[in-house]
Amino acid sequence: MKTNFKISHYTRQVVLILLSLLTFQRAGAINEANEYSIKAMFLINFIKYIDWPHGTPKTVFNIGIVGDSEIYDELIKIPALKTTDSRNIIITKITSSDLSEQDMIFISRSENKRLDQVVKKFSRKGVLIISEDVRLQLNQSCINLKKVNHHICFEINLSNCKDNGLSISNKLLALSNNKNQ
Amino acid sequence: MHRFFLFVFILLNLASVPLLFGQDSDSIPFYEMSIEQLMNVKVSVTSNVPLPSREVPAIITVVTRDQIINSGAHDLMQVLDLIPGLNFGVDVEGVVGLGVRGNWGHEGKVLLLWDGVEMNEELFSTLQFGGHYPVSQIKKIEVSRGPGSAMYGGNAEYCVINIITINNDLDGVFVDGQYSSFSNVVASSGTNVCLGHNFKNGHAGISTYQNLTNRSNRKYIDNYGNAYSLSNLSALNSSQYRLDFALHKFSLIVFSDSYKILQRDGYDQVYSEGYRSKFLNCSINAKYEFSIGKIKFTPGIKIKYEHPWFYSGPISDDGFSPFNVKCQKNLGYLNFGLDVKKHTNVTGGLQYYQLVATNNFDGITFSNNLDVFETYNYSGYIQAITKTEIGSFIFGSRIVNSKYYGFSFVPRLGYTKTWDNFHFKAIYNRGYRAPSVENVNLNKNIQPEYTTVFELEGGMRIGENSYLTSNIYDITTKDPIVFYYDIINNNDNYQNTTKTGTRGIELEYKLKSKDWLTILNYAFYTTSGHSSVSDYSVPSFPNLNLAFPANKINLLSTWHASNYFTIHCSATYLSERFGKSSIPSIHFIHYPEAVYFNINFSEENVFTDGLNIQLGCFNIFNSDINYIQPYSGNHGALPGPSREIQIRLNYRFSKLEKPANGR
């Protein structure tokens, strides 16, 4: 097979110029993703750093999604959802009136107006309550996810976590945006 | 060429050396990221926002890496065969192409992007399937049935197959080896090695792939009754070499794909001996992203050198002629994206390319009486997506000016709405196909063709863990460019005919439980209501096109029997099909209904973490798989694989800790 293509002078110049750009780059994010695919992965990662109150041993870990949110579609896409102790993770859409047993609930932005109402129903029941884009100190959720400078970060309300019987690891606290707690 | 690649390689390594030391590794793949790594991932803000598939303004099927790995597939055909609306047919000289929703899409109607590299060759705009493309490198396949011309330009008239591989972000080593056998001959044997390293601001990677596949071990019989065994005369050799480099917002792919087809089936009559055609695609894709205010810009280049359908031997007694045309495409683009308001996103871009084909065979020129054929094309596109309380609206369009055909305009309109348990899409799309180099070379009067597609999709959640999606569509292609072969005068050419098209329905049901994933899909098409091109039609069955079944059903099921052991089964049903013969005594050939079954067993982490072993059997009951010619070319059906037993080993070493949700 003949492969002796003639690479034009122009082409060679373009390649060289592009390659030369490599040396002038600065630090920054290496990847991008959809907001809710990132948030979904945050939820799954939180499980590793939190101890739930002891009770009847469970075979599954339940995550409830309150409100219409893309996070549900992203969570169910994650392959082979399991906790570190090999429990299956079940993702369910729930309503604010649904009091089914959950280990974690995510309250979507669309429900923020009814946040207090929803939180009340799940507080002090050993449930990790996660909100998005709210002022954490003024409400009763445990963790709040927010977008800062195009990145997702989180803040923890330790007092609310303790009220719900949840123990937060120091590592998660260190990574959170509220290092003063 | 080798020197050139060496040059690029050395440069890349030199550029990366300072970055390989003293920097922490950032971890990808995405589903294995820790919290620290997730905090470094930027939220995407451009047009390419990966909307949930329920909201994407297209009829789209996504195949994940898990599905591909669990299926044991060693060939892209095995994966695409399980997608509703896609079917394969034979062209000429052992080349197999794709049909979409009952329409032959082989030449310029299906766009295949491999990490953004266009795999369609530029002379006839075809794709070549069978033992081609390293399936084990694939991370995700998005198949969008319906025109993508407004976003992607030419070749995207019926379907876009967008493949994303692990090469962009692999941080470690992936090695894959597979061997499969028919009863009497090797079916497929391949190796695949990928190395990647993520450093603080970027990524570098290299991969190689080598594969030998035999299309079949059955007999090919032409329409005159001549036959030969494909056991040793259907070899498909494929190799791919690739370099990846990304630094901050700059990324580069240097890519070489080689494919060789050994064939004796010719155009209509079996040849006296085998001939080997070669396809070579060498590409360089580079892009850089930057923002000015809220607007994100992505300028880039795509340079492609090709040598498709290459045969350099003398004219044989069989009439098989040399073909030696090289092609170079230089493409530059500037894309932009911005969020105009919180719920409105606008993307767009400008693109220019120059295409130069050179005939290297002495004494043969293009129809312009020159050794060189040159064309250019420039285009602009824009798309806006706005989310409102009553749903999302999509407005898009592309305007194109090409050297030979002047201006074309293709619009795209869409509406999507999701509720908790339902979703709805309505899409109007227009696609186009400008004639390719050889279309023009063979027929100077050939004109572009246009396709209009209407699609409606609805979906509903049934219970907690299952989802049913259904769509109906109507496709009309005006002035279709049709290839024909005249057996009396032994010549081939292209012509615009009047209209062709299909309409139909596609259903998909997904059921996911703790350890099971089951997918059932169904596709139906009819030519009813559309005028039919005589070269594609079956007179005794006026609602059918040649080669493609009206009904196709796929059932896929994956069972995670334990944390490490997975069983994957699939079955495909095709309703009756028809082929055409130019011999009056035969005229039409009937192919009865067919069912194929596959099974694959996977054991993960055997002996050590990351080492996986698979054992599979494809076409368990040894059914006759046939690739039928979808037009009047008087070519017999090309046999596909018979029963095939496969063993496969792969190993993935990643620097990442196992994820919390990982198995």
Image (cartoon, rainbow, N blue to C red):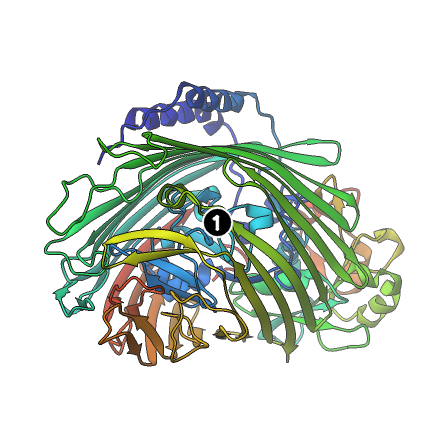
Horizontal side of residue A141 vs A1, given as left or right: right
Where A29 sits versus B141, above or below?
A: above
- Image quarter for residue B364? top left
Q: Chain letter of disc 1? A: B
Where B365 sits versus A160, above or below?
A: above
Q: Position of residue A115 (x, y in %)?
A: 85, 63
Horizontal side of residue B584 vs B148, given as left or right: left
Q: Residue at x 27, y 74 (%)?
A: B587
Q: Residue at x 40, y 63 (%)?
A: B79
Q: Residue at x 38, y 44 (%)?
A: B121
Q: Position of residue B145 (x, y in %)?
A: 53, 61
Task: Work out whether residue B391 or residue B578 is closer to the camera in this orientation and state it.
Answer: B578
List the residue tagged with mark 1.
B155
Task: Work out whether residue B394 or residue B36 is closer to the camera in this orientation and state it.
Answer: B394
How many other residues sit within 10 Å of disc 1, few (<14), some (14-19) or many (≥20)?
many
* Mark 1, secondary structure of its residue: loop
Q: Position of residue B162 (x, y in %)?
A: 49, 52
Task: Work out whether residue B153 or residue A139 is closer to the camera in this orientation and state it.
Answer: B153
Task: Work out whether residue B404 or residue B115 is closer to the camera in this orientation and state it.
Answer: B404
Where B34 sits versus A16, above or below?
A: below
Horizontal side of residue B1 vs B389, given as left or right: left
